Amino acid sequence: MTAPLRIGPYAVERLLGVGSFAMVWLGYDRALDAHVAIKVLAENWSHDLRVRERFLDEARLLRRLEHERLIRVHAVGELPDGRPYAVLAWADGGSLRDRLGAGEIPAPTALRLLGEVCAGVAVLHRHGVVHRDLTPGNILFRSAGPGGGEQVLIADLGLAKALAAASGLTARAGTPGYMAPEQDDPGAVVDTRADVYGLGRLGIRLLAAEPSGANPTRPDQPRRAPEIRLRDDVPAAVAAVLARATAHRPADRYPDAATLHAALIRASGPAGRPIAATGGTGPAGRPIAATRASGTAAVSGPVRRQPPPRPGARRRYRLRFAGAAVVAIAAAGAVGPEPGGSGSGRPVGGTYTTGPLTVALPPAWSATGATWAGQYGADGEPEPALVMSPQPRRWAADPRLPGAFVGLSASTAARATPAGFLAERTHGACTPAPARVTRQAGVEWTVVAYRCDRGRPQIIESAALHPGRPALVYAQIVPPADSGPAFVDTLLAGVRLR
């Protein structure tokens, strides 16, 4: 295979990989002094309009979602021979397949990694998209700044489809070993529970006592409850969660990735300590939990509590999970509806409270919110957040509206300072001003203002530590067009923490 010298405006340096439908080249953008990954449709598929459209759909889907947990699309183009290509962010940290090939990943790191993958797939599910092909090769890593952190990214959505069109797919979609059983049936409805199965298979591959023991049951074998044998430093209740995630019948699995993620957090226990499974049910409603068998955790019918894990003697992985840029749309989309509310939580100009957060609303603004999706406390419950705006439910989608997202997270405070957290949340298309510090209502805020040429003209990123307990409060603000720093400071002064 002869490498092209250039693809569009990008100089080609080397081949990164070849798949069934495309090849990926490492390119260099001289104008931006940055490397990119260039995905080109394979020549033998260029005549197939259906495959070509699916290739372009992937780029369009990623561009539309534009989330820090998904591979970003910078541009699309076409080669002189008519084949389309997509210019993607380069995942310079390689894939999960590479890391598994290099050796066993310690259980605490593997559990955190599985949680990051679940959170990424939950982004797709919130937007009505099912991935269909969750494998170690489709989980990528990208450096997240000078602090040594990494983003965990979901890639290769070429087989993903909107849930409204997910039934009746005639082509077999997925990778054996990670593909849900129903994906073998062309007439079956394939929904988010197929991705739950793939996530469960990933979890078993990460945590199995032996890699050879991670092989799934073949479709022609009896549909009995799966036996899952995990390493002895894995909390026992995790095996029960993975057993339910990989149940043969979709109805017996968790409904989506977010629910699976919450179950994994509860099973892992506070600070990663194992907890007992109590009152849980597995496939077909049978009670299951974890047992000890030959030094490993196993699941198969009723069980007993697992002893605490032993410290592992395996080599450490330097892997700190850091979120990337949280743009206004992504932050707002992470907030669920207020339970029992109408979506406009308080009369305009008053205050709004959710959990330990209370905010003073600017004139003509209202608020809605309940939890910060993707952020979970030590109890496994989502952490609190809210959106406030003149029209809070439209703020995420309408760049003309001012508004703010406010969230409180103890888990984030455990890994990042306010300045470090904001460094992870840059806006590539915007120009930042120097960070400033302002003290409002007894809270010391670090504030970075971004000026943007398109979309929202200004985005304010701010973060602080809770003055009374270990938690980080984050406020992303899009101020009114005619306002200045005084508006931001007044809004921050109205954030009260219990």
Image: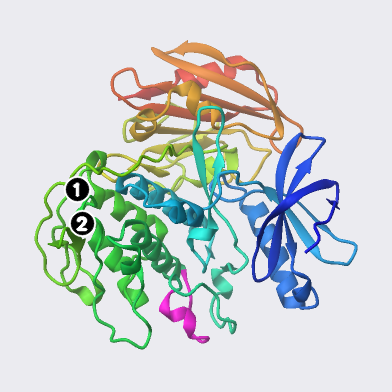
Task: Report crowding for label 2: few under 14, some 14 to 19, many 20 or more residues within 10 A (C-alpha).
Answer: many
Q: Is residue 193 left or right of residue 147?
A: left
Look at the picture and state if 344 lies above or below 469.
below
Q: Is residue 30 left or right of residue 34?
A: right
Label 2 or label 1, whichever comes before in sequence order? 2
Residue sitting at x 38%, y 12%? 442
Task: Report crowding for label 1: few under 14, some 14 to 19, many 20 or more residues within 10 A (C-alpha).
Answer: many
Magenta segment range?
180-191
* Picture quadrant of residue 478: top right
Residue sitting at x 48%, y 45%? 334
**Quadrant housing the N terminus:** bottom right
Q: Secondary structure at mark 1?
A: loop
Where in the figure is residue 284, as x and y percent of width and height? 23, 77
> Magenta residues: mostly which secondary structure?
loop
Measured in 3D between alpha carbons, the distance from the residue under mark 2 to the one under mark 1, in whole angstroms, is: 7 Å
Q: Which residue is mark 2?
A: 237
Name the residue type under label 2.
Ala
Residue 61 visible, this angle: yes
Furthest residue to the left? 304
Where in the figure is residue 354, as x and y percent of width and height? 35, 36
Q: Secondary structure at mark 2?
A: helix
Q: Which residue is mark 1?
A: 274
Between residue 101 and residue 220, name the one nearer to us: 101
Q: Is residue 322 magenta?
A: no
Name the residue type under label 1.
Pro
Furthest residue to the right? 80
State if disc 1 and disc 2 touch (CB < 8 Å).
yes
Residue sitting at x 44%, y 80%? 182
Where in the figure is residue 288, as x and y percent of width and height? 17, 67
Q: Is residue 89 left or right of residue 249?
A: right
Where in the figure is residue 410, as x and y percent of width and height? 33, 32
* Picture quadrant of residue 224: bottom left
